[in-house]
Image (tube, helix red, strand yellow):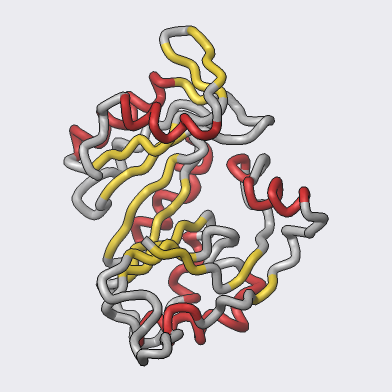
Amino acid sequence: MAGWNPWHGCHKKSEGCANCYVYRIDAKHGRDSSVVQRTAEFDLPVRRGRDGNYKIAPGELVWTCFSSDFLVEDADIWRSEAWDMIRERRDLEFLFLTKRPERIAQCVPSDWGEGWPNVTIGCTVENQKRAQERMPVFLEAPVRRKILCCEPLLGPVDLSRWLGPWIDRLIAGGESGEQARVCDYSWILSLRAQCNRAGVGFYFKQTGANFCKDGKLYRIRRKDQHTQALRAGINTVE
């Protein structure tokens, strides 16, 4: 898997953004995360090595814009160039998450149609309030490959009315960092059950720093949050 941040910085959008890891890391370096800037790796997908081959090999999954939101308004001036690179690299799979599904239709290129097969867009739904707000919009958006991200999961969420074969998978997980809010295992299991009933793939990504199971609160070290989630053995997709 490769990473590509064409721009950096974002504006907090909802409850899931309160303890944003990008803001947390930037603060340690005296950087203002609310200032959205084009990065030095903007053209990474089309860069070539001395041998003339692309530096990102064909077939790679490219995790896109993980220090921003691909649809953030400030990036409107650069996004068409980013789409051009994604179009050129149809041999790669690009994946990005957004809390702005209402902007999808206005931000895609003219030849997008119902979506490009090499682009997966994920919508974040961290609680029931945001599910009610975003899911109807996201399901109507012109996206061929859709996933859901319930991370950080901040409470029980019922997505059953919106789940179906149009959603490829759901990723769930707790919140990291010193100020992390609690993630309860029962919320995770509920989402898994909903996905199983709807035939949607489920992936428990991480426990988060404060994880509650059977009424007992556990403080999980950062390095163990992913492995502990994997050990639960509840994933139905890799």
Q: Quadrant of residue 94?
A: bottom left
- In this rendering, the answer to whether 91 lies above or below 174 is below
Q: Position of residue 119 (x, y in %)?
A: 33, 69
Which residue in the rendered view is the most extreme toward the right?
30
Q: Position of residue 56 (x, y in %)?
A: 37, 75
Q: Position of residue 113 (x, y in %)?
A: 30, 79
Which residue in the rendered view is the most extreme toward the top?
215
- In this rendering, the answer to whether 74 lies above or below 213 is below
Q: Which quarter of the rendered picture does the C terminus lie within?
A: top left
Look at 44% across and 40% down and name the residue there. Answer: 150
- In this rendering, the answer to whether 112 lies above or below 157 is below
The one nearer the camera, 202 or 161, is 202
The one nearer the camera, 45 or 201, is 45
Look at 61% across and 71% down and name the residue there. Answer: 7
Look at 49% across and 58% down and name the residue there. Answer: 98
Left or right? Give the position of 58 relative to 173. left
